[in-house]
Image (cartoon, coloured by chain):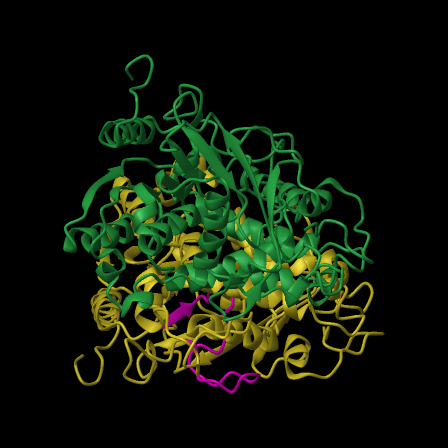
Chain colours: A green, B yellow
Amino acid sequence: MNTANPREFQPHSDARVLEATKPSSDYIDIPESEPLHLDCRQLLAPFRIAYKTYGTLNAAKSNAILVCHALTGDQYVASEHPVTRKPGWWETMVGPGKPIDTDRFFVICPNILGGCMGSTGPASPNPKTGKPWGLDFPVITIGDMVDAQVRLIDHLGIDQLFCVTGGSMGGMQVLQWASRYPERVFSAVPVATAAWHSSQNIAFHEVGRQAVMADPDWCEGRYHELGKTPRNGLAVARMAAHITYLSEEALHRKFGRSLQDLAAKSFSFNADFQVESYLRHQGSTFVDRFDANSYLYITRAMDYFDLAAEHGDVLANAFRGTRTRFCVVSFTSDWLYPTRESREIVHALNAVAANVSFVEIESDKGHDAFLLDEPELFATIRGFLNAAAERRGLKPAQDGR
Amino acid sequence: MNTANPREFQPHSDARVLEATKPSSDYIDIPESEPLHLDCRQLLAPFRIAYKTYGTLNAAKSNAILVCHALTGDQYVASEHPVTRKPGWWETMVGPGKPIDTDRFFVICPNILGGCMGSTGPASPNPKTGKPWGLDFPVITIGDMVDAQVRLIDHLGIDQLFCVTGGSMGGMQVLQWASRYPERVFSAVPVATAAWHSSQNIAFHEVGRQAVMADPDWCEGRYHELGKTPRNGLAVARMAAHITYLSEEALHRKFGRSLQDLAAKSFSFNADFQVESYLRHQGSTFVDRFDANSYLYITRAMDYFDLAAEHGDVLANAFRGTRTRFCVVSFTSDWLYPTRESREIVHALNAVAANVSFVEIESDKGHDAFLLDEPELFATIRGFLNAAAERRGLKPAQDGR
């Protein structure tokens, strides 16, 4: 089944829009006969999951690591992004000889359902109309994203993933995988995440959505058809979110009150301060690579995430009987997903006598630390994966690391 | 000089616009012959300062307390707001028998320069054109706001204020008063504030400004003339800012993940969660009472505030030789102006052997605590003012409080 050739609609030909409909990466198309049963009780079919793999799947298919990306991530975890031409978003972590060693492990990174890099999302053509789904796309959940990923793992013929990992919203998917498909997850590494989205985080997301929706070029979500892009609204949303990814200390260290290429204040509304210029840049570059409706849908999925609520308000019930080995990681200066939220996961796992280790990493880089050069994070994940691989009976790393 | 009757421009007649040009409160008009020398090196004249007073000035004119308002505050500190019909913004603190006791003290609360409740600001008519200033209004500073207030205090014939107090941006004005006009400030109570605006706070303000400026109804600041209002942009700015006024704990306690009048998630972009509904309400009601350009100018003034930079990067130099008695107050859960920023003020005051007391109040209400029912705040300010009044030789409160 090919949904990449819409019947009527011709998207304007910028690279981002093209990736949403004709991804450069691999993809699978799930036919109409095998619909996804969404949490909102709608069926979704056909649909596509775009993905990248790195390394080689061993004969026993026992060395696969699923990397789940965060809100604005994609399948290009360890290779160049086809739109921005920037390196993969987790190249510090994933690659030959890296903590997630592609000389040893087979790494799979799918673009999430609802995304805009080739997996079916609001920018994809609605098979009923041939036009982009827009707001007719069903509201999805983290559980739906995971269910869609299961189809990919089935397609690859993998019964049990050696590990599922990811940071932030990626970590939510990790928890959902371990809870919903415990037999298919040998080990799980949720990083800088939470088992439910806090009130403050919902609030920040709502500001972002309102910023997008306030942009007249959003056109009630029909901007693709109308040849428009809600640039300003999406940029404002990104700017607000970006502040939450950094710690106050990191902002202070990076920028302080330094002026941008100026000897003195301009007494105007120009970007006098470096931090203003930085944020404006973050906003405008984001718009070049990301779809505004995807931003609405994915933030909504995160807001809806509440693993305890799915299990009678007792988080431990989400993991009862689990044999998965967990490594939970948080960062001291992360105020978006603070350590106490990781501790709640650990307490729930302890309550069901799960095999869990927990590391809180000292860092002043805020939530973004999980994407940055954090030697203790690398050592933690390398060590945990080595030990788990031994348990799983995988060959040791070639140099004994 | 009367600048309230613009030559050409007729504002559309909603209450907010009317207050900007014809305030219900008292006001003074400073004539063209007595311009304000702004920090941006422009001259501003004529200009108007609207203000309210409460209580009675004694014969010695020694019992005056100047209350400086915060970003979105106004002169209606202890009386009904003429647009919203809500009670004054600090009625818990100011009034008969209250900590700032209007039976005893003469309370003066001016609308700041750049505001929109009658003092000259970007919504006021530009005397050169008769149209609203818009972005032709000069970029002002906290220092300019204070200099404008000095004219009011001169007009009232008061040599020395018994006390200058205020929270948040009001606290910045307190510090600026004490630094620039030490002989005119007997005592100073800066609450929940800082001597310079942090990188993170500049970042949040920049998001708000970008949200306003992204609204096509902002019309490069000329919306008044064109009969428009950048409602959506200003509402988004307010929503983002509002999150920073509350602590994560306060949001959690108030809202948690509770749904708004719903048994289950709607799987839509409606305001499912109470916190979303609350934020949307905050955004839309704000737009009814506040001017978007004023929001731009006042946030800019806050960003520019840096009392140390004005004094060779040594904050203590701002207070050298001071005889003012200080009481510095912070709140434990205020992450916008955290306690460490109050400590920096206290350290600077200690370095010049100033008379300073410092109280960090335990509260989980975040920055907003200074406006809320915080008995320790009331006790602190009542106690400090009583002691200072005794030093100043003022009569004790009638009931000996």
Residue B268: x and y, percent?
55, 71
Q: Is residue A13 left or right of residue B204?
A: right
Quadrant containing the N terminus of chain B in the rendered view: bottom right
Vertical side of A141 occupied by A96: above or below: above
Vertical side of B161 occupied by B200: above or below: above
Quadrant containing the C terminus of chain B in the rendered view: bottom left
Q: Is residue B191 left or right of residue B25?
A: left
Front in this rendered view, residue B188 or B247: B247
Residue A141 appears in the picture as rendered: yes
Residue B390: x and y, percent?
21, 69
Residue drawn at point x = 16 percent, y = 51 percent: A350
Residue B149 appears in the picture as rendered: no
Vertical side of B358 occupied by A373: above or below: above
Give the main secondary structure, helix, strand or loop, of the magenta stretch.
loop
Front in this rendered view, residue B32 or A26: A26
Residue A320: x and y, percent?
21, 57
Residue drawn at point x = 77 percent, y = 66 percent: B127
In this picture, which residue range is highlighted in magenta? B63-89
Residue drawn at point x = 61 percent, y = 61 percent: A211
Residue drawn at point x = 31 percent, y = 55 percent: A179
> In the figure, residue A93 lies in which quadrant?
top left
Front in this rendered view, residue A145 or A231: A145
Q: Is residue A375 left or right of residue A121?
A: left
Residue A61: x and y, percent?
39, 33
- Residue at the far right in the pictured view: B8
Q: Is residue B97 magenta?
A: no
Q: Is residue A120 left or right of residue B190?
A: right
